[in-house]
């Protein structure tokens, strides 16, 4: 069946205009001032509403292992939450196993992703260096369409790689058409600061921030950028949280380093004071890098507005408050690192960005859809509204509002970071490849309909271009 969306206001990263859309076989076939329906066509009236391209969240941790339970959302609950929140594609991080090949690990994760409601892909995390890793990198891109990996500069003994290993992996990845995501924190210094804090009896959640100060992020960011520059390889700095790190990225861009920067909604809206909330409420807000002093938010928003930051990702790594976060009630170092945010990223960035006048409608689309699609090899299939693109669309009413609460969320967690915040605008419908999967706030799509995203290689120099 063909579908026509009528009378909506189409918003892309470059334009805003009123138009009708004709969708056929999941693809946008026609865009016109007026499209008259025929007898066999479904009609959706979007009068007075925006039509956005579907959101693309390139930073999720669904089904991640943690002790005996894992993160609270798997690919069923997590992608239902994503759909409800206007996200039509995700790229999830794999979790490596010692001694397992990258390709074997990816096959396990592809199996985990099969119940997904929306389209999904993967970044492969590399936590140990060997010659086999270098041999497998070209195969990841060619055979599996995985054109992004991730390296950690923290969590020694679990995920962290050293500078020499980072250089060799980055260099090979760049040659294979793969962009490297980097978690930039100085893990060695952080480990020492944590040990010092605990030895002094400083175990409250606020010390999570004190033991991961901005200088540890800024130093690691500068070092990662220097390594990428030496390797002549593209680099993607995940979850930039502070002005100091952003300054290092700006300096690297002036040197023509192929760098793309991401921030997260919680760094744009929440601040370090949440880590001092009473009755262990502060434990809900533990993530790494930690929430920063509020003044950093102005620099992050300006970074988005200027194009220095081209992507906002949720870093959705959800843990239950009761039974998981509370494991660290007496020691902040034992609180699982990660927060939920997949379901609200679209609304948070729209409200605090567009509605409050910090960014334009076009920039909103850029960081929530177009930028991620271009950076990670999904464009021109995903990331915009144009003829030939997948009909991944969000119909959004800007003239209403809603209050965020965990009582009305699809995320499988017992709290919400943004509890009680009233946001302007509400999603009325979400389409994935032309199929309505959300109607009036309710998820109506079925699990298992998501498709695996085989992504294009990243050409040399591609990632340095502002999206």
Image: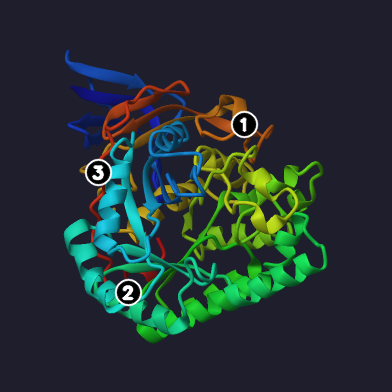
Q: Which numbered disc, 1 or 2, marks the residue that appears first in the sequence? A: 1
- Locate residue 83, reporting x and y percent: 41, 34
Q: Is residue 222 above or below residue 456?
A: below
Q: Is residue 134 above or below residue 433?
A: below
Residue beneath the point at 41% across and 50% down: 13
Residue beneath the point at 37% across and 60% down: 97
Residue beneath the point at 25% across and 58% down: 104
Q: Quadrant of residue 32?
A: top left
Residue beneath the point at 29% across and 19% down: 43
- Locate residue 264, reporting x and y percent: 55, 53
- Locate residue 250, reporting x and y percent: 54, 74
Quadrant of the snapshot with the C terminus: bottom left
Label 2 sits on residue: 461
Label 3 sits on residue: 389
- Give the CA distance from mark 3 to mark 1: 31 Å
Neighbourhood count class around disc 3 (C-alpha, 10 Å): few under 14, some 14–19, many 20 upward: many
- Give the CA distance from mark 3 to mark 2: 24 Å
Q: Is 50 left or right of 419, judged from the image as shown?
A: left
Say which of 233 and 157 sits in front. 157
Q: Which mark is residue 404?
A: 1
Neighbourhood count class around disc 2 (C-alpha, 10 Å): few under 14, some 14–19, many 20 upward: some
Neighbourhood count class around disc 1 (C-alpha, 10 Å): few under 14, some 14–19, many 20 upward: some
Indicate the secondary structure of the residue bearing disc 3.
Answer: loop
Quadrant of the snapshot with the N terminus: top left
């Amino acid at each position: 069946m063909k579908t026509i969306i009528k009378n909506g206001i189409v918003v892309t990263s470059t334009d805003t205009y009123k138009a009708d859309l004709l969708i056929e076989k999941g693809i946008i076939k026609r865009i016109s001032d007026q499209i008259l329906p025929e007898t066999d066509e479904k009609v959706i009236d979007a009068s007075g509403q925006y039509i956005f391209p579907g959101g693309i969240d390139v930073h999720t941790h669904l089904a991640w292992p943690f002790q005996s339970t894992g993160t609270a959302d798997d690919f069923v609950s997590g992608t239902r939450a994503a759909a409800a929140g206007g996200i039509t594609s995700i790229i999830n991080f794999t979790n490596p196993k010692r001694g397992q090949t990258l390709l074997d690990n990816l096959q396990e994760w592809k199996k985990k992703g099969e119940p997904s409601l929306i389209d999904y892909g993967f970044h492969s995390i590399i936590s140990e260096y060997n010659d086999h890793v270098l041999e497998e990198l070209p195969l990841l891109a060619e055979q599996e369409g995985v054109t992004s990996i991730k390296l950690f500069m923290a969590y020694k003994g679990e995920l962290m790689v050293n500078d020499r290993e980072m250089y060799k992996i980055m260099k090979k990845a760049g040659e294979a058409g793969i962009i490297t995501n980097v978690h930039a924190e100085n893990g060695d210094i952080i480990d020492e600061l944590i040990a010092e804090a605990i030895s002094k009896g400083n175990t409250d959640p606020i010390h999570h921030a004190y033991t991961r100060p901005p200088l540890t992020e800024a130093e690691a960011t500068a070092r990662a950028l220097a390594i990428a520059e030496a390797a002549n390889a593209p680099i993607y700095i995940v979850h930039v949280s502070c002005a100091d790190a952003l300054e290092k990225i700006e300096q690297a861009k002036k040197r023509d380093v192929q760098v793309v920067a991401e921030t997260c909604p919680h760094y744009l809206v929440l601040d370090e004071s949440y880590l001092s909330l009473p009755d262990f409420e502060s434990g809900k807000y533990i993530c790494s890098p930690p929430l920063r002093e509020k003044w950093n938010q102005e620099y992050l928003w300006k970074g988005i507005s200027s194009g220095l930051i081209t992507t906002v990702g949720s870093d959705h790594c959800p843990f239950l408050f009761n039974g998981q976060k509370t494991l660290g009630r007496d020691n902040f170092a034992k609180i699982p690192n990660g927060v939920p945010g997949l379901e609200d990223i679209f609304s948070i960035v729209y409200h605090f960005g567009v509605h409050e006048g910090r960014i334009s409608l076009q920039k909103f689309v850029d960081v929530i859809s177009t930028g991620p699609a271009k950076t990670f090899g999904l464009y021109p299939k995903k990331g915009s509204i144009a003829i030939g693109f997948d009909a991944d669309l969000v119909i959004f009413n800007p003239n209403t509002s809603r209050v965020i609460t965990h009582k009305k969320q699809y995320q499988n967690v017992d709290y919400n970071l943004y509890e009680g915040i009233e946001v302007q605008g509400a999603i009325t419908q979400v389409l994935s490849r032309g199929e309505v999967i959300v109607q009036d706030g309710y998820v109506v799509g079925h699990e298992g309909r998501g498709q695996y995203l085989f992504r294009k290689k990243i050409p040399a120099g591609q990632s340095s271009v502002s999206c």
